[in-house]
Image (tube, rainbow, N blue to C red):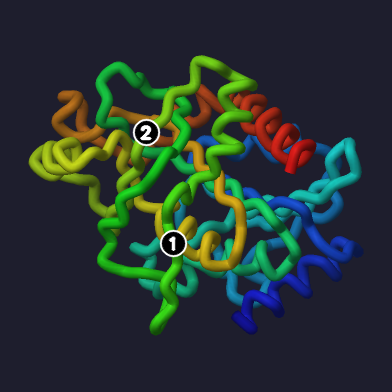
């Protein structure tokens, strides 16, 4: 936790502000959203801030940006997500959301690019996360730290999101360790236990955010149909391409949702 406090102090000092109001981690496909939130106060190379490292994943900016909204609120945009498969331990995965909490944020927005298990959700479809299944066999919590996960993904913000776009559907996100993609048999298993979306991030961060007292909102971008749902082979290039194609539309959607969450929070 001390590392998160040090990171928060460095970010707030560089921005010349006392706190942020909301934090947002931008996953694959969501990078354009930051520019729509307001005026950039400061953009930092993440690896220069305590506890963060250079991003190893194509499609992630590797920066930490503080943005001032038109209403004068401040948003910390995290473009330097650490994935569990990078081998830096679960505390590194949770560092971004813990830094957000230490910087004063009351809301954590988590986005990702993911595989879709519903064949009607074509690549480029945004889906609200209603719940998750953590299949990493890990937790960011230590010891007898029992945290309720009921309604982990804010019903309030999900309702606001559906006011912004009534066509948005909801689903259950399953996080696996990666970095390999799932087999068709594994996807069949995931469908049988209630998953609609599958990826390699978000769930561990959401648990850490809830434990830190943050209101959590999650939204996925379906970048490909999961193995066995489609006959096409899976690749990260496909993920990036789908994100680029959907970028302007989902960026505007996310900016509108964040604006409403800030207005009503």
Residue 132: x, y in percent? 36, 47
- Residue occupying the point 36% across, 71% down: 87
Q: Which residue is mark 2?
A: 171
Assess disc 2: are there few (<14), some (14-19) or many (≥20) residues with their C-alpha within 10 Å of its C-alpha: many
Label 1 element class: loop
State the quadrant of the C terminus.
top right
State the quadrant of the N terminus.
bottom right
Q: Which of the marked residues, 1 or 2, is nearer the chain's N terminus?
A: 1
Q: CA distance from mark 1 to mark 2?
A: 20 Å
Left or right: residue 112 versus residue 106 is left
Tell me, yes or no, if residue 126 can be seen here: yes
Mark 1 touching mark 2, by CB under 8 A? no
Tell me, yes or no, if residue 88 can be seen here: no
Assess disc 1: are there few (<14), some (14-19) or many (≥20) residues with their C-alpha within 10 Å of its C-alpha: few
- Residue occupying the point 56% across, 23% down: 162
Residue 8: x, y in percent? 73, 70
Asked if residue 42 is positioned above or below residue 8 in the image, the reply reads above
- Residue occupying the point 47% across, 66% down: 93
Left or right: residue 189 versus residue 54 is left
Q: Which residue is mark 1?
A: 148
């Amino acid at each position: 936790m001390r590392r998160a406090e040090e990171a928060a102090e460095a970010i707030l000092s560089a921005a010349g502000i006392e706190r942020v109001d909301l934090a947002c981690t931008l996953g694959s496909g969501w990078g354009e959203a930051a520019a729509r939130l307001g005026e950039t106060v400061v953009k930092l190379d993440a690896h220069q801030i305590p506890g963060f490292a250079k991003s190893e994943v194509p499609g992630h900016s590797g920066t930490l940006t503080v943005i001032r909204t038109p209403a004068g609120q401040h948003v910390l945009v995290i473009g330097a997500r650490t994935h569990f498969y990078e081998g830096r331990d679960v505390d590194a995965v949770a560092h971004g959301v813990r830094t957000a909490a230490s910087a004063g944020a009351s809301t954590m927005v988590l986005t990702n690019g993911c595989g879709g298990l519903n064949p009607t959700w074509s690549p480029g479809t945004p889906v609200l996360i209603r719940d998750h299944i953590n299949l990493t066999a890990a937790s960011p919590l230590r010891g007898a730290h029992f945290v309720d996960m009921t309604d982990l993904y804010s019903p309030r913000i999900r309702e606001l999101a559906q006011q912004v776009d009534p066509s948005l559907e909801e689903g259950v996100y399953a996080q696996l360790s990666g970095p390999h993609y799932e087999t068709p048999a594994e996807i069949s298993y995931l469908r049988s236990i209630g998953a609609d979306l599958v990826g390699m991030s978000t769930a561990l961060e959401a648990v850490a955010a809830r434990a830190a007292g943050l209101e959590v909102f999650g939204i996925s971008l379906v970048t490909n149909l999961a193995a066995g749902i489609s006959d096409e082979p899976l690749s990260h290039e496909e993920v990036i391409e789908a994100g680029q194609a959907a970028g302007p539309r989902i960026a505007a959607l996310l900016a509108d949702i964040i604006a409403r969450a800030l207005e009503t929070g």
